[in-house]
Image (cartoon, rainbow, N blue to C red):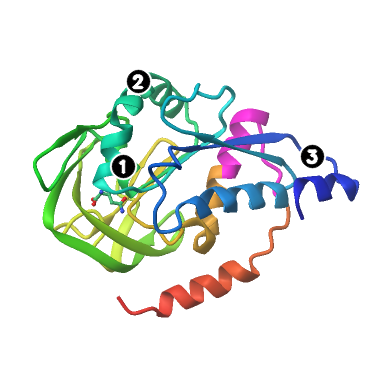
Amino acid sequence: MSPAEATAAGNQSKGTIRVVQLYPRDMNIYGDWGNALVLQRRIAWHGYTPELLEYNVGDPFPDGVDIIVGGGGQDSGQLVIQDDLQARAGELKELAEDGAPMLVICGLYQLFGRFFKTRTGAVIPGIGVLDVETHGTDERLIGNVKVSTTEFGEVLGYENHSGQTTLGSGVRPLGTVAKGTGNNSNDGHEGARYRNIVASYLHGSLLPKNPAIADFLIRTAAERKFGSFSPGDPDDTYAVLARDHAARRPR
Ligand SMILES: NC(=O)CC[C@H](N)C(=O)O
């Protein structure tokens, strides 16, 4: 049911949750925009009113941000956004430290870290919200991934990156890779967790197949804004089918 339909049906909104997708023009590959769409739909299913905004290079930064979502991108897309991202570092760091829920995938995961040194030797500075660093290699890590996590159960998705990310002591991994590569070829970890940020290499999109992560972001946003979260009754039929299908895909 759309928010408008919910209102027409007489359901009282529990309040507005504002989602901002960072740089969809330059950083949105392998279906990452689907993460914002899932948040929009599930926020409405939980009885809140979703507001979905796009933030691109040069835009004024929106006020009252409740959830930040950022996707992946080619190295060239990361170069395009790098200066604007540096200009927004202060606002994003403040939101992160204040506990705003965020989901950053692949290219923006790398740039929320300290830096990404690409395969060609270019160093793209990150904003240092996450204590991670990334080095490009000649090997591309591509394929379906399964991750065991304590917070979200089994996380499923698809990776495609040349960057290999090493975690510092200021973050913890999202989980342990059961199939695929994840952060790098060495330590068997995928993604990073810090405060209410979930960072991951997984596209596909991630949230349609992993509603537990979507609901974590929504619950955290509601608790932060309204003091509590009252869940609705989301329809997980397609999520269950998508998870089942993704889990059976070969690497
Ligand atoms: N899928 C991505 O976002 C890729 C990120 C980065 N360009 C890399 O290759 O590592």
Kindly report which numbered mark, 2 or 1, lies closer to the viewer in this rendering: 1
Q: State how far apart marks 2 and 1 are (Cα).
A: 16 Å
**Residue occupied by mark 1:** 77
- The answer to whether residue 171 shows anywhere in this view is no
Counting from the top left corner in percent of width and height, residue 134 is at 18, 43
| Callout 2 crowding tier (Cα within 10 Å): few <14, some 14–19, many ≥20 | few
User: Looking at the picture, does residue 79 appear above or below residue 37?
Assistant: above
146 part of magenta stretch: no
**Viewport quadrant of the N terminus:** bottom right
Q: State how far apart marks 1 and 3 are (Cα).
A: 37 Å
Magenta stretch? 218-231
**Residue occupied by mark 2:** 87
Q: What residue type is disc 2 on?
A: Ala
Is the distance from the Cβ of mark 1 to the nearest ligand 1 atom less than 8 Å? yes
Give whichever of 8, 165 is nearer the camera.
8
Counting from the top left corner in percent of width and height, residue 235 is at 69, 63
User: Looking at the picture, does residue 216 appear above or below residue 139?
Assistant: above
Q: Earlier in the sequence, mark 2 or mark 1?
A: 1
User: Pointers 1 and 3 in contact (CB under 8 A)?
Assistant: no
Please give the label number shown on residue 229: none
What type of secondary structure mainly makes up the magenta span?
helix
Give whichever of 218, 64 is nearer the camera.
64
Q: Is mark 3 on a helix, strand or loop?
A: loop
226 part of magenta stretch: yes
Kindly report which numbered mark, 1 or 3, lies closer to the viewer in this rendering: 1
Tell me if 139 is positioned left or right of 193 in this view: left
Q: State how far apart marks 2 and 3 are (Cα).
A: 35 Å
Q: What residue type is disc 1 on?
A: Gly
